[in-house]
Image: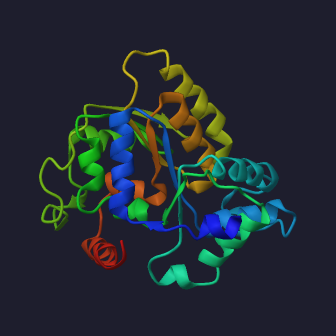
Amino acid sequence: MIDKDYNREIADTARVAREIASAILDKRPLSIISLCDGESATLWAGKGFGTFHYLAGRGFPGEIGPVAEQLAAALAKTDIICVPRSGGLARMALFAPNNRETIRLWDIRLKKDALIGDAMVCWYLLFDMWLPMMLQDRRVLVVNNEADKVCVALDSKTIPGTPTNSMAEWWPPDWVRTKQTIPIILKEGIAGSEQALSEARDLTTKVDWPDICLIGAGARTAHLAVNIAEMFSIPVVELGAAITWLYEPVLQDNYVKMLDLYRREG
């Protein structure tokens, strides 16, 4: 039943990190996505209860129906579904309850062995060097609207920050050492996902397949994570907005606040 599925034991960040690392070592598919208010609004609207949600004001009108169906189908195939659990926002009505009830509304049957994680895990994986350790000497596929910038940052091994507000005291020099990065630029948001999948399929003809994939496109593109994971038999982590921390300057205050939340609830 959905209640039992949704209320499975919550996997902490270390458990999620271990699952990713194990998938890399075992060369098996693993998809990880984090749900938030945009996903719940999309699924509600997909059942005909309203046609507007906050993303519509950002240029996404007219896609609710097919995107909702696509998202619901992908959730039933996702290996680790992360829902709002930690932090003050998770206790607000528009986050955890909305996601829980939309899963029930769509009668989404999670995989028998699927894990439930915390939606903040996409940020928490940046602490304790979880993600940098897993990118060590790996071929990394990046799918994002600015995937080229992410790859440049990973290749150059730079630390996000500015001369006056550097993260060097938090993230050590040479903070990540990838073997190779492969960017796929996600154009036009969800509308460009088919093109992104086509480019990913083209990579399957090459000898050196990626070891892991990072997506920064939001959980509504869960189908990308599921398909790419199966395509290459690799772990795919949907980082959402957290992917910007890999290439944009990070305010020290923001980093410390997120670090504190991770230490208390991650």
Identify which residue is drawn at 81% across, 53% down.
65
> Which residue sits furthest right?
48
Indicate the position of residue 33 as horizontal and vertical percent values: 53, 54
**Quadrant position of residue 43:** bottom right
Residue closest to the eye, 153 or 103: 103
Compared with 148, 4 (above or below) is below
Q: How many marks?
A: 0
The C terminus: image quadrant = bottom left
Indicate the position of residue 140 as horizontal and vertical percent values: 36, 36
Identify which residue is drawn at 64% across, 55% down.
110
The N terminus: image quadrant = bottom right
Compared with 196, 58 (above or below) is below
The answer to whether 89 appears left or right of 132 in the picture is right
Indicate the position of residue 46 as horizontal and vertical percent values: 81, 59
Compared with 172, 232 (above or below) is above
Identify which residue is drawn at 25% across, 56% down.
160
Residue 196 visible somewhere in the drawing: yes
Compared with 228, 37 (above or below) is below
Residue closest to the eye, 222 or 233: 233
**Quadrant position of residue 8:** bottom right
Indicate the position of residue 22 as horizontal and vertical percent values: 35, 43
Residue closest to the eye, 252 or 28: 28
